[in-house]
Image: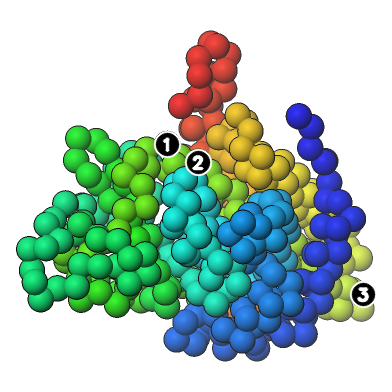
Amino acid sequence: MTFAARPSEEQHELSSIVRNLLARRSDSVAVRAAAESELGYDPELWRTVCEQVGVAALAVPEEYGGAGFTLVETHVVLEELGAALTPSPLLGSGVLATQALLLSGDEAACHRLLPGLAEGTRTAAVCWAGEDGRWHTDRAAVRADAVDSHADAGTDAVDAAGGTEAGWALSGTATLVLDGVGADTLLVVAALGAGRVGLFEVDPGDAGVHRTATPAMDTTLRFARVEFAGARAVPVTLDAGALLPVLHDIAAVAVTALQVGAARRGLDMTVEYAGQREQFGRPIGSFQALKHRMADMLVAVETARSASWAAAQSAAHRTPRLPHDAALAKAWCSEALHHIASETVQLHGGIAITWEHDAQMVFKRAHATSQLFGQPHEHRRRLFRLLEQAADGRPAS
């Protein structure tokens, strides 16, 4: 199977529509106001992009109320959100939670939850990382215990959304939960014992759930710490062992779209500034040394975009190359954005480290996203292992 090497005409049009909308509704002032709000994003803007563009529905099959496209189209939108530095629940709810449900194979949960997520009228958050801040694919910090749902006559053991007895209780703590404070539904990765992990649906209003906002270096990303103390849960799948590695790769690839967008923003800001700032009677962009540095920034943006795009195609079509492409893209794009953010700050001079200037937001986005779903050195190590396995004729792991 072969894939398009570049965005199609329709995907270009989608990119243009989102870009123009964000230019009107998500300038620097709006971004900062949204980041400082209670939810961490602008709910009116989120409603607009969902209703007018259908961004949350793009990768959701039509039978679940979605548009029936692929993760590639979502990738296009994420890149534009990254370029505008716009806070939104698309990564946490529209990609991570939505794909977790689709990968689970639970049609009842998909029919119950995905229509609202696709419309953007509800959001969901995946509780996965533990105290070590890592998204493990073979274990979980939260523990799931089977309970007798009839033991307490005073407790309503019937799940209001699904109409089924929960029969499970969760205990433990999840950290770095994307948009976890305002999510309407929690999807929790929990250990079942004997090396097994499952995925559970939890009502965040349950008395056994406590959510706390977690400050982040990048103020446009909102995290939460979620503590469970006997919280009632409904199983989505009791065998998430095969789901989590794929979900981790999909999440890592989605992050690269935000990184490429931010890298493009850093380059554009720098080129514009270099054409305006004068030194020795001429724009600093006319000096050969700075031309070379900006040319290197352009190369970093384009190579990162190529790696990110290839990984998005693999994620959308679930190819055997997904682990390889995801590891390569996450490592490459993280380091490319680091380089571009550093150059953006340097070439803007002292103004770039002030709170009022957007260059510091690009710099913080670089550092924050490089940690999400695996650091560059972790993905490089994994990539080398995959290449060794391929050379030896062993299956990928």
Q: Earlier in the sequence, mark 1 or mark 3?
A: 1
Left or right of residue 377: residue 168: left
Compared to residue 232, the image places residue 46 above or below, namely below
Q: Quadrant of the N terminus?
A: top right
Left or right of residue 167: residue 391: right
Q: Position of residue 191 (x, y in %)?
A: 25, 46
Left or right of residue 23: residue 318: left
Amino acid on which disc 2 is placed: Val
Residue sitting at x 44%, y 41%: 243
How many numbered tags mark residues here?
3
Q: Is mark 1 on a helix, strand or loop?
A: loop
Viewer can see residue 348: no
Q: What is the crowding at mark 2: few (fewer than 14 residues within 10 Å), some, or many (at least 20)?
A: many
Amino acid on which disc 1 is placed: Ala
Question: Which dot, 2 or 3, sits closer to the camera?
Answer: 2
According to the picture, the residue beneath numbered tag 3 turns out to be 282
Residue sitting at x 82%, y 57%: 11
Q: Where is residue 205 in the image (x, y as percent from the top left)?
A: 29, 77
The answer for how far apart the CA atoms under marks 1 and 3 are is 59 Å
Q: Which numbered disc covers residue 242?
A: 1
Q: What is the crowding at mark 3: few (fewer than 14 residues within 10 Å), some, or many (at least 20)?
A: few
According to the picture, the residue beneath numbered tag 2 turns out to be 246
Question: Decide: marks 2, 1 in contact (CB < 8 A)?
Answer: yes
